[in-house]
Amino acid sequence: MTAIAFQILASAAVIGALVLVIGARSTVGAGLGAVATSIAVAGLFALLAAPFLAIVQLLLVVGAGGVGLLFVVLLVDLEAERMPARSIRRRVVNALGVIAAASLAGLVVLTLASTPRADLPVDADVGGVFALGEALYRGFAAPLVGLSLVLLAGLVASRVLVAAGPHENEGDGETRR
Amino acid sequence: MMVPVDQVVGLAIILFALGLVGTIRRRHVVVVLFGLQLVTIAAALAFVGFNRMWAGRALASGQAAELDGQAFALVALVVGVVELVVGIGLGLAVVRRRGSADVDDAHLLGSGR
């Protein structure tokens, strides 16, 4: 049952990523592909004994990130994406991309061959809120403080960037309110 | 629950590669941000996968399970969302200034268009 769920979620994640990268012509389609991948990865977190991370993934990445981006796309008049015309340079880049993809496929095969299988029992409390909170606040207190500062900086930066009007962005030296 | 960790890590690599290709290949600022988000999610998945393996081994040998991998994954997810939010702000500022959401159009500093 767990193996079937893993295969379904993994397939959904890869399909969503392919829609984002290749399949979707529109920005909203790409966004929906990214949201589908994020939801599938949240399910994978739950399968890997990390339920708190699964909820965080749904709230932060899917809820805040994905939906926020989709709202930006829907509310702001962004033009459609223009893909570059086919040229020799583009074909060379594509060929290099194929070589890189083949190398990456070899890396995947090597990783699968060298990583041992974890057919081991896991305690039900592993990855729970209490256990993860204890690990965070005992061993990662300083990084958590740094993370809060990063969050604050991101919040202030996004507010300043978005709140600035078009006249302020033109840099004409005059601030009109 | 028994989940093959090698397949989890392989999936993380595939998602990382797809996110990287999306970041490089696509030209719309919003889609590039989606690609970067996918890269971050793939890294977090690899962290959680390896943590699952090591936690299982520790419990099987009678030791306490360490959750360092999940802590790192949490940090990666939060930083990824912050990066997304700041990227949205930058993208909107670029669109307002340049009138285009194409990242290739924003290749000149200063007042160049």
Image (spheres, grey):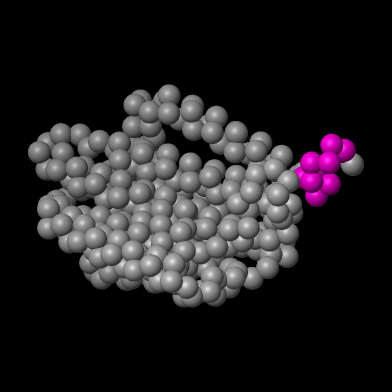
User: Residue A144: which quarter of the image?
Assistant: top left
Horizontal side, residue A165 vs residue A112: left or right? right
Q: Quadrant of the C terminus of chain B?
A: bottom right
Horizontal side, residue B24 vs residue B89: left or right? left
Frontmost residue, A109 versus A43: A109
* Depicted B16 relative to depicted A177: above or below: below
Frontmost residue, A73 versus A170: A170
The residue at the point 34 percent across, 32 percent down is: A135
Frontmost residue, B62 versus B88: B88
The residue at the point 43 percent across, 71 percent down is: A88
User: Residue A133: which quarter of the image?
Assistant: top left
Q: Main secondary structure of the magenta part?
A: loop
Report x, y in % for residue A148.
53, 31
Residue A9 appears anywhere in the view: no
Q: Quadrant of the N terminus of chain B?
A: bottom left
Report x, y in % for residue A102.
25, 65
Start and end of the magenta stretch? A166-175
Residue A167 falls within the magenta-colored stretch: yes
